[in-house]
Image (tube, grey):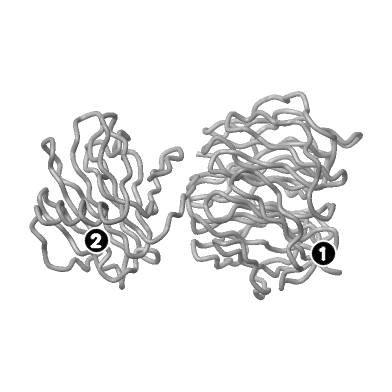
Amino acid sequence: MSGITGSKLNIRGSGRIAKLGTDGQALTSAGAGMAAAFEDLAGGVSWQTIETGSTMTAVAGNGYWVDTTSNACTITLPASASVGDTIIFTDYARNWGTNGITIDPNGLNYQSKDDTFTIEYGTDGMSLAITYMNATQGWVPTIDEAVADVPAKGNQEGIFGYGNPGATAVTNLVSNAGVVATDVTGVGTGRERLAACEYGGDKGIFGFGHDGSNVVSMTNLVSNAGVVATDTTGVGTVRQQLAACGYGGDKGIFSFGTTPMTNLVSNVGVVASDVTQVGTGRDDLAACEYGGDKGIFGFGGGASNTNLVSNAGVVASDQAATTGTARNIPAACSYGYDKGIFGYGHDGSYTDATNLVSNTGVVATDVTGVGTARGKLAATQYGGDKGIFGFGDTGSAQNVSNLVSNVGVVASDVTGVGTARYYLAACSFN
């Protein structure tokens, strides 16, 4: 019904109507009973005129048709509530997927989380009923009916780390506004040609690479405050020029590279032993999440084929070559909660082309590039639903960055911050 990641509570609709159990969690019902449950509840509220503004204040006992055709809407809940108070919100124009609603609990808890969490709903055709339970649980969704379930992940901050020149261990944090910070003194073995991904919903992990002398398999965990830990003894076959992404909402996967193997990462950051590689072995590729809980590896090895990753961490066989230009050393990240983007790389010369990935894992044709053409860069999510490409190589090391909007539009260059470098990695945290 909801996914909680760090300080963001992203609820995109679960395609069900529910009644509360004794622990405050929703117990699902189905079929005619679902429709009856909504009708019974809706009949007990006072329906208001259509709301079209960018803000509104809700009153207990009321039902609201919220029309977000022209703009998103922030809804402020009552400052005080009594047990059993109920409010209903319905997507009047079936447009919440484009312009969603944000709920401000106004000092009260929402689904046991305090007022510091951001609560968003963004599924077309959704109807939402919330009931005040008690001070601990606060407002709890009792009906959550939608046309699709998009489990969303919304980490707010990111981190670029490691890279060349010098097989460094330096890192640069990315704020929730996409601002890259100055260098943080490196922790762990300096290396390049490594990969990174999220795990645990709000943390990250750097893994594998080349330390300037040897190919390695050690990893470094990243806390939900962006602090990089010391080396963890490596598990799995040493390799470099691999890629990594999240899957399942709270786990990660390293795969491909110079020695084609796969290693899953648990939701507590433990790297598993080797799994035999599926798909064409290749290096210098990229990977990102899509669909909220799945992943995709793409490009690399002079090819444009992709391999999807299920929400159980199973890598699929090669998809037919994508419609994008075959290339090496691109980067990739997620955006818009459930979509992804591959960008930049080398297709005989450095390119700035990008390819969007739909929420079903379909890679689109090339989009004319924006920003400095380069390869060996990294990318990560930030701000919950946006992305950033950073650093890279044009024949010389770069520290330029390019932001990606929540609809997948790449912005022009931002003047670099931090040590210029390439063959680095990046992931998000919260």
Q: Residue at x 47, y 50 (%)?
A: 152
Q: Residue at x 38, y 49 (%)?
A: 11
Residue occupied by mark 2 = 90
Q: Nearer the viewer, mark 1 or mark 2?
A: 2
Where is 210 relative to 22, above or below? below
Q: Residue at x 59, y 29 (%)?
A: 268
Q: Secondary structure at mark 2?
A: strand
Left or right placement of residue 373 versus residue 50 in this view? right
Q: Secondary structure at mark 1?
A: loop
Residue 199 vs residue 274, the one in the foreground: 274
Badge 1 density bin: few <14, some 14–19, many ≥20, Cα 10 Å? some
Task: Tell me the quarter of the picture where residue 223 sits.
Answer: top right
Where is 135 relative to 51, above or below? above
Badge 2 density bin: few <14, some 14–19, many ≥20, Cα 10 Å? many
The N terminus, quarter of image: top left
Residue 127 vs residue 6, the one in the foreground: 127
Residue occupied by mark 1 = 303
Left or right placement of residue 190 versus residue 342 in this view? right
Where is 320 relative to 223, above or below? below
Amino acid under disc 1:
Ala
Choose the circle earlier in sequence order: 1 or 2: 2
Amino acid under disc 2:
Thr
Task: Tell me the quarter of the picture where residue 159 sits.
Answer: top right
Q: Position of residue 79 (x, y in %)?
A: 15, 41
Left or right placement of residue 319 versus residue 5 in this view? right
Q: Position of residue 112 (x, y in %)?
A: 30, 33
Q: Residue at x 68, y 32 (%)?
A: 185
